[in-house]
Amino acid sequence: MCKVTVLSRGQKNTTLSMPAKLVQSTREDRACSREERRRSRRATAKYRFAHASRERVRVVAFNMAFTELRNLLPTLPPDKKLSKIEILRLAVCYISYLNHVLEV
């Protein structure tokens, strides 16, 4: 037997004797319901809208960073459209080239 103190608003604390197994199952139910509450919260339209908004802001910032990097890199046709991986590879080559120029 375990003693469980029940707290309620406006009333005195009440101590109940309960079997230990029942106390453990009550704790497990609470943990389960906490997980379920989190899942249900994530399933709401408000949460999805907020998440989508944050993701859009992240993607816009990411694309702006690539655009800025692209503007710093020399290419033969200056307005040539490059993929993100091409921009990164070109940046690595350009940094390597600049290091070589500094060493000479």
Image (cartoon, grey):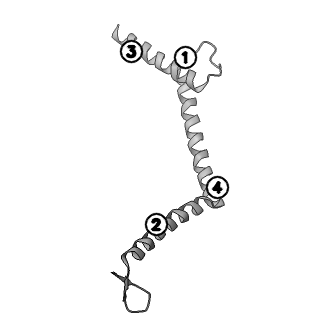
Residue drawn at the location 59% of the way across and 46% of the way down: 55
- Looking at the picture, which amino acid does disc 2 mark? Ala
| Mark 1–mark 3 distance (CA, rounded to whole Å) | 16 Å
Given the image, on which type of amino acid does mark 1 rest? Pro
Label ID, residue 49: 4
**Residue carrying label 2:** 31
In the structure shown, which secondary structural element does the residue marked by tag 1 occupy? Answer: loop
Considering only order in the chain, which callout, 2 or 4, is on the residue closer to the N terminus?
2
Question: Are the two marked residues, 3 and 2, in contact with CB atoms closer than 8 angstroms?
Answer: no
**The N terminus is located in which quarter?**
bottom left
Q: Nearer the viewer, residue 12 or 18?
A: 18
Nearer mark to the viewer, of 1 and 2: 2
The type of residue carrying mark 3 is: Asn
Where residue 17 sits in the image (x, y, percent)?
36, 85
Q: Earlier in the sequence, mark 1 or mark 2?
A: 2
Return the x and y of residue 39 as percentages of the image width and height.
56, 60
- Could you tell me how far apart the alpha carbons at marks 4 and 2 are, in whole angstroms? 27 Å
- The quarter holding residue 78 reads top right
Q: Which mark is residue 74?
A: 1
SS class, disc 2? helix
Q: Nearer the viewer, mark 4 or mark 1?
A: 4
